[in-house]
Image: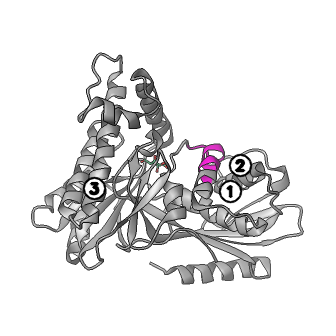
Amino acid sequence: MMPLDQLVAGAIEAFTSRFGRPPRFGAAAPGRVNLIGEHTDYNNGFVLPMAIDRWAIVVADLTHANNSTLWAIDLDQTVQCDFAGLRSPVAGSFANYLLGVVDQFAKRGDSIPNLDLAITSTVPIGAGLAGSAAIEVATATLLAEVVGARLDPLEKALLCQRAEHTFPGTPCGIMDMFIATGAQPNHALLIDCQSNTAEPIPLPPAESASVLIANTNVRHELATSAYAARRESCRSAAAKLGLTTLREAATTMGIPPIFSGRGLTDRESRCAEHVVCENERVRSAAAALGRGDLETVGGLMFDSHASLRDLFDVSCPELDLLVEVAAQMRSDGSVFGARMTGGGFGGCAVLLCRADRVTTVSDALAHRFSSRFTHPATLFTVAAVGASGACAL
Ligand code: GLA
């Protein structure tokens, strides 16, 4: 994968040839893969993501024109609008990931001058690797430079989360933005989404483990609506249990939790059980990762997948097949663990593999996937040591 400095050079060159001058501002933010802790962030629970060496890059300069020009280099799409008159999303456009952030700066009282701006990204969009958060966080980092604002990583993450809620319109949790602003190289982050604090957990040395991502290249229609529906089931389950969030269920209900006689629907009960047990798995996995016990981390990843498939009901046949093949490669030590990552209904599986077996594992996954489905899966490794958080260029 192209290193960050080459990506930045490409973005600067593209900007310069389109707008006739070099950009004065630039920022980059990484995508992420979540190792464990799915659908827990908006329940005030725990997550364990790591940033990956895939980036969104935004470069810009002030313009005297009455409109800003936003150019998505990879899509070759352009949107023009006046930041001062920004009111509502542009239906179906990439620009919403940027405009939501502009809107949040305006709500803080900053007035953003119109810009010529170009964006490029190597984080696949819609694949469960937080491609939209990377764009938002890169944009916020750039705009902070433009207006001279100082935002700490948490403030920036919260601002970008509000941007995602209002412009693209996904009611996401804080995980994706938090890791994009706060990642540290060589570490995953154990994020407590109640206190919004994070503990860096050392990743295994690259010579012992590889992080392999298998993209199903499917995005099921119901992804956005089902995400919102699961979030609502969690909220109503907590309310029926007399709790503010399902985070609190962990201490009061035992493991596995007992919800009978509380009037929960079957869906609510299964969602609640997933969240309570997943929070426990995240804490156990972080402890195991910290002591280099990858077998234990891997076992918890498989358990997490089973729970997302059977209880939370957000997996799909493509993801299940990848995880099933990975599980078959556990017995000879090639694979430590595997699970779906991100919101689900398509997107990617993440595997933790023995570093010297990664080619064998990729080949097996690709082969089994294409013998069952009509399109191929895309397999790639990410730097097992992770990437750093957002930076101005
Ligand atoms: C998406 C959201 C996150 C999180 C995951 C599921 O990636 O953006 O906030 O809820 O789904 O864990």
Give the CA distance from mark 2 to mark 1: 7 Å
The three-letter amino acid code for the residue at tag 3 is: Ala
Report if the beta carbon of the residue with label 2 is closer than 8 angstroms to ligand 1.
Answer: no
Residue in view at x 80 percent, y 62 percent: 68
Residue in view at x 71 percent, y 54 percent: 99
- For the residue pair 23 and 140, the one nearer the viewer reads as 140
Q: Earlier in the sequence, mark 2 or mark 1?
A: 2
Indicate left or right for 71 with 171 as reference: right
Residue in view at x 80 percent, y 60 percent: 112
**Tag 1 secondary structure:** loop
Quadrant for the N terminus in the image? bottom left
| Location of mark 3 (residue) | 285
- CB-based contact (under 8 Å), mark 2 and mark 1: yes
| Location of mark 2 (residue) | 90
Rendered position, 327 above or below 46: below
Indicate left or right for 174 with 203 as reference: right
Report if the beta carbon of the residue with label 3 is closer than 8 angstroms to ligand 1.
Answer: no
Give how far across and how far down residue 195 sits, in percent: 49, 47
Give how far across and how far down residue 23 sits, in percent: 74, 78
Dividing the picture into quadrants, the one containing residue 73 is bottom right
Rendered position, 339 above or below 278: below
Give the CA distance from mark 1 to mark 3: 37 Å
Give how far across and how far down residue 44 sits, in percent: 45, 42
Q: Main secondary structure of the magenta part?
A: helix
The three-letter amino acid code for the residue at tag 1 is: Ala
The mark total stands at 3
Q: Is residue 161 magenta?
A: yes
Q: What span is colored magenta in the figure?
A: 160-170
